[in-house]
Image (tube, rainbow, N blue to C red):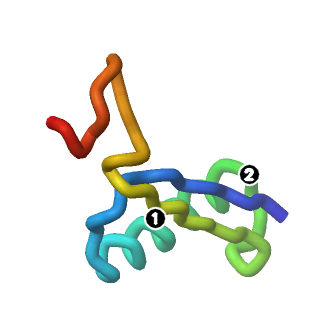
Amino acid sequence: MPIVTVQMLEGRSDDQKRDLVEQVTEAVSNTTKAPKEKISVVIEEMSPANYGVAGKRASDQ
């Protein structure tokens, strides 16, 4: 029962998230041979104010 967690900045549309879940499920199923019904995908969204790279918050860019 694979569980995949995707962490990303908030701001994607419902259609984009739906497509992401479908494509991640497909990739995991193809790679692990796990049945799609047993694959869970969790999307964790974060505010740009709560994420930084190279000493800069995404919200400050």
Nearer the viewer's eye, disc 2 or disc 1? 1
At mark 1, the secondary structure is helix
At mark 2, the secondary structure is helix
Name the residue tied to disc 2.
32
Q: Position of 47 compared to 40: left or right?
A: left
Given contact means CB atoms under 8 Å apart, are the residues at marks 2 and 1 in contact?
A: no
- Number of other residues with Cα within 10 Å of mark 1, as a class: few under 14, some 14 to 19, many 20 or more: few
Name the residue tied to disc 1.
23
Residue type beneath disc 2: Thr
Q: Position of residue 49 (x, y in %)?
A: 34, 48
Rendered view: 27 above or below 1: above
Rendered view: 47 above or below 41: above
Q: Position of residue 13 (x, y in %)?
A: 27, 76
Residues 47 and 44: in front is 47
Question: In the image as oriented, which residue stretches furthest toward the top?
Answer: 54
Q: State which quadrant residue 54 falls in.
A: top left
Residues 60 and 20: in front is 60
Measured in 3D between alpha carbons, the distance from the residue under mark 2 to the one under mark 1, in whole angstroms, is: 14 Å
Q: Quadrant of the N terminus?
A: bottom right
Q: Position of residue 55 (x, y in %)?
A: 34, 20
Question: In the image as oriented, which residue stretches furthest toward the left?
Answer: 61
Look at 74% across and 60% down and name the residue there.
3
Look at 61% across and 66% down and name the residue there.
42
